[in-house]
Amino acid sequence: MKIESIQNKKIKERAKLHTKKERDKTNLFIIEGFHLIQEALYAHQLEELFILESIENPFDFPCFSCTQSVINKLSNQISNAKMIGVCRKKEFKTTKFKKILFLDDVQDPGNVGTIVRSAYSFGMDAIFASEKCADVYNLKTIQSTQGALFHLPYFVTNLKKEISFFQEKGIPIYATALHQQAEYLQDIIIPDSFGIVVGNEGQGIHKDIIDMCDSCIKIEMNAFESLNVAIAASICMYTFQYKK
Amino acid sequence: MKIESIQNKKIKERAKLHTKKERDKTNLFIIEGFHLIQEALYAHQLEELFILESIENPFDFPCFSCTQSVINKLSNQISNAKMIGVCRKKEFKTTKFKKILFLDDVQDPGNVGTIVRSAYSFGMDAIFASEKCADVYNLKTIQSTQGALFHLPYFVTNLKKEISFFQEKGIPIYATALHQQAEYLQDIIIPDSFGIVVGNEGQGIHKDIIDMCDSCIKIEMNAFESLNVAIAASICMYTFQYKK
């Protein structure tokens, strides 16, 4: 089917997905580019496909053939995009996770996306994010995940409730914090199941969440004591998973 | 001294520092905000200070008192900036480094900045970057460094020449690559002196540079085999420095 006008009803509806409000209401989100669309297709999350009229559809999935102005209306990019996908958010019912990352108000979309990418690469089972975190279905975030979001359970939720839930199951929860009492990462005796909490770029983790965690860990540093939150989260996940 | 017009000669000159060409020509660069200006002052790299007329100068350094439109002309931000510094690039004469990071065409300014921040926190002695890397004196990069750039020697240079130079001094150089022959990071016996090379976001390290390195290392991963380059660089530097 062809779509030539940006006044087309479907296009006007889908363009609203650039707002979090519309994504929350419809449970849909937009992705761009070959790689992400391919990942969405493999993960059975692709709902609609919009392809520039001059390009052959490279996917085994029906598409709307669109003019450049229609594609641009759906795209977030400055330069001309060529393919846009609309995906449905996945619902995850299980909570049988053993390796969990908690994000307490991580604000930057790029940081959230990079953390999701690392978490999946490093074999984490799930991510629980507080409501003030950057929306993971924001296009910038999804691009930073490189498609990892299609593989990893991700929940937006009340962190304290979830932390208690896993603690009751006997899973120890570690806060990353520069506390004096914090243990150095290399000194931690790493358990089979664990949760790691990372905090906001400026403020760190909320004090009441630090207080309920089983221990605090700090990353060894020579100088400066300053790390990007995606770096800190990734170093903790990597060390917990692979340290010999 | 007061500056009220964006036609002021100095302001017109300094606004050109938003281009790499002008930064290369003058060896000057622009920074914004209290934290970075403070770091530049401590590092004796601050040359000029421009402060919004309605704000008291918080630094022990003479300033030009400027209207908002003058400050905006020097700023890269969308919202109204309040203070701008002009800094001089530092020259480093010594090459007596024992822990060196090499950046082979790392393109994204945020990645370069985050890598500089981690490298300084993790006690690296210097960074050598290829000419195609994002300019470290770009405002976005400097902001991502959080000021680490004022502390860490950073050279833009021919990587192959530098790698050979350090190899001749007996320093082993490790390429981060997903080669089959690569050794896992946790299996490396870490020497006292070392160089680590990281590559471009899409292409990785150039093959001729991989070939001249002493070994290849790969980071352990469960799935996906995909990490952001700033994450990969930081995990390698952290593990080389602190692994017990």
Image (cartoon, coloured by chain):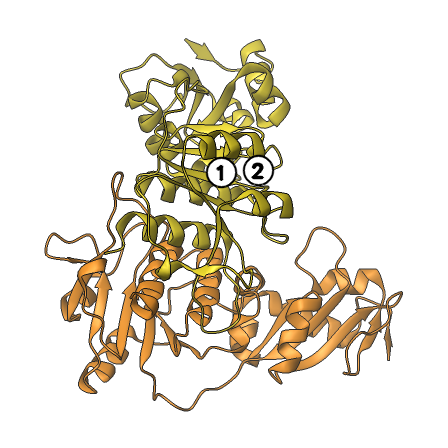
Chain colours: A yellow, B orange
Q: Quadrant of residue B33?
A: bottom right
Residue B225: percent from the left, percent from the top? 26, 44
Q: Is residue A79 visible?
A: no
Amino acid type, callout 1? Thr
* Labels 1 and 2 within one chain: yes
Question: In terms of sequence position, does the residue under pointer 1 or pointer 2 come before the other?
Answer: 2
The x, y position of residue A224, in whole percent, is: 53, 71
Task: Using the image, tell me which numbered label, if any, was put on residue A141.
Answer: 1
Can residue A199 be spotted in the picture?
yes
Q: Residue at x 22, y 76 (%)?
A: B191
- Disc 1 element: helix
**Left or right: B131, with B172 as reference point:** right
Contact? badges 1 and 2 (CB < 8 Å)? yes
Neighbour tally class for label 2: few under 14, some 14-19, many 20 plus, Cα within 10 Å? many
Instruction: State the mark number for residue A238.
Output: none
Q: Quick check: A136 above or below B211?
A: above
The residue tagged 2 is A134
Q: Nearer the viewer, residue B103 or A241?
A: A241
Residue located at (53% from left, 34% from top)? A76
